[in-house]
């Protein structure tokens, strides 16, 4: 399978774009934040454990995150017509990236592209302020934002060296962003086939 990662800070429109891109490319959309929130609706020891971290805006421990995600990946087989997974919200730090590399190698899969939604920080701050007003936990939202820039964004350096990053201008309309992603993925495919 050929997987794609989508990466961008809170407020970059990542979730919206992922929902459009996944069906268009036959990718199963695996969003760790969505998976954890669904899990938290359950009444179990696992959901209690996850809740402790998510409610504070902290990262769920890597071993637990990896376990939950890999279980979903194993249940998304090619015979459902999926070409791969669109990973949204994972990896978020270097240990998670290393695990992903191992898993991909073990499965004989490939990380085909990393879609990076770039939005100027002042625009993000503005969007975040608006969101924080509706959010019941603005403190956790700010913490998540901080973690993105310290732990997640630096992962781009690793992927840049591999030449798989598509830098997308996220400061456009939703349709324009989708179109830029589609152009970027098409150009990568053309290069591969050439
Ligand atoms: P998100 O909606 O992607 O911002 O995720 C919401 C929350 O889920 C995060 O603040 C974390 O507590 C948790 N979470 C999501 N993805 C991960 C991940 N890859 N590693 C650890 N925790 C995660």
Image (cartoon, rainbow, N blue to C red):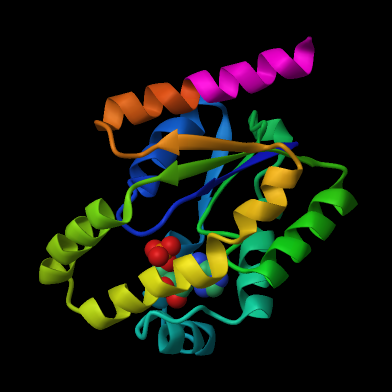
Decide: is 183 above or below 33.
Answer: above
Residue that appears at 81% across and 41% down: 109
Residue 132 left/right relative to 98: left
Is residue 36 something that shows in the picture? no
Residue nearest the viewer, comparing 124 with 139:
124
Residue that appears at 64% across and 33% down: 82
Residue that appears at 75% across and 36% down: 1
Residue 17 left/right relative to 101: left
Picture coordinates of residue 96, whole percent (x, y): 68, 67
Picture coordinates of residue 79, whole percent (x, y): 71, 32
Picture coordinates of residue 27, whole percent (x, y): 58, 35
Is residue 163 something that shows in the picture? yes
Residue that appears at 13% across and 61% down: 130
> Is residue 188 shown in magenta?
yes
Q: Which residues are magenta?
A: 183-194
Residue nearest the viewer, comparing 16 with 172:
172
Decide: is 12 above or below 93.
Answer: above
Task: Say which quadrant the C terminus sits in.
Answer: top right
Decide: is 50 above or below 141.
Answer: below
| Residue with the most extreme top position | 194
Residue nearest the viewer, comparing 149 with 189:
149
Picture coordinates of residue 165, whole percent (x, y): 62, 39
> Is residue 32 shown in magenta?
no
Residue 129 left/right relative to 81: left
């Amino acid at each position: 399978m050929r997987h794609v990662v989508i990466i961008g800070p809170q407020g970059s429109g990542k979730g919206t774009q992922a929902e459009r891109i996944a069906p268009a490319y036959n990718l199963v959309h695996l969003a760790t934040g969505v998976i954890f929130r669904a899990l938290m609706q359950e009444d179990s020891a696992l959901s209690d454990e996850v809740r402790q971290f998510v409610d504070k805006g902290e990262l769920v421990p890597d071993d637990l995150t990896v376990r939950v995600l890999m279980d979903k990946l194993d249940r998304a087989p090619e015979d459902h017509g999926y070409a791969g997974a669109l990973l949204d919200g994972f990896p978020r730090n270097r240990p998670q990236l290393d695990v992903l590399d191992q898993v991909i190698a073990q499965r004989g899969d490939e990380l085909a592209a990393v879609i990076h939604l770039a939005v100027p920080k002042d625009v993000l701050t503005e969007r975040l302020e608006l969101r924080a007003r509706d959010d019941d936990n603005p403190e956790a939202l700010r913490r998540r934002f901080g973690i993105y820039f310290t732990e997640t964004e630096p992962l781009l350096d690793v992927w840049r060296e591999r030449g798989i990053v598509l830098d997308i201008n996220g400061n456009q309309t939703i349709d324009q962003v989708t179109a830029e992603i589609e152009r970027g993925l098409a150009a990568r495919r053309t290069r591969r086939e050439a």
